[in-house]
Image (cartoon, rainbow, N blue to C red):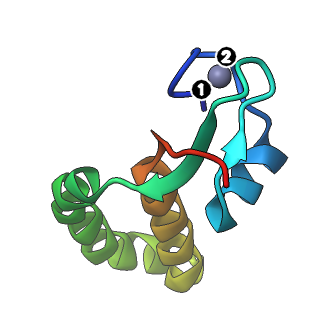
Amino acid sequence: MKCPHCESKLSFSLLRKSIRRPQPCPSCDEGFTVTLSMSRMFLLIIPVAMSLFMIRPISLHWGIPPNLFSVLLIVLYVLSCATLIKRPVR
Ligand SMILES: [Zn+2]
């Protein structure tokens, strides 16, 4: 993901740290934090719920545990809802 101030790429460990508290960007020194975009969650909930519903018979047909698919789908859902916002570092 990119810094909301200067568009420079941010490392994964920095993004992970910013979940707990705002982190300064290494190139512009402005603070940012990872959050979940409510509007994106709202937009994606219907396709995700539908895929969860449809993936069950497909995974049973393939002989793969449906829970494995469900977890993967939910992880992807949360990741795609994550967004960076500007937040001063304290
Ligand atoms: Zn920056």
Neighbours of disc 2 within 10 Å: few (<14), some (14-19), many (20+) = some
Relative to 11, is 51 above or below?
Answer: below
39 with respect to 65 (left or right): left
State the residue at coordinates (58%, 83%).
65
User: Which residue has dot 1 on it?
Assistant: 2
Neighbours of disc 1 within 10 Å: few (<14), some (14-19), many (20+) = some
Q: If you read the primary sequence from the N terminus, does the residue marked by circle 2 or circle 1 appear first?
A: 1
Q: Position of residue 71 (x, y in %)?
A: 54, 75
Ligand number 1: quarter of image: top right
Name which residue type carries label 1: Lys
Name which residue type carries label 2: Ser
Task: Tell me the quarter of the image containing the N terminus.
Answer: top right
2 and 1 marks in contact (CB < 8 Å)? yes
User: Which residue has dot 2 on it?
Assistant: 8
Q: Quadrant of residue 18?
A: bottom right
Q: Position of residue 64 (x, y in %)?
A: 59, 76
- Please say whether residue 62 is visible from this viewpoint: no
Q: Nearer the viewer, residue 68 or 1?
A: 1
Q: Position of residue 50 (x, y in %)?
A: 21, 67
Q: Quadrant of residue 54?
A: bottom left
The Cα atoms of the two marked residues, 2 and 1, are separated by 5 Å
Q: Secondary structure at mark 1?
A: loop
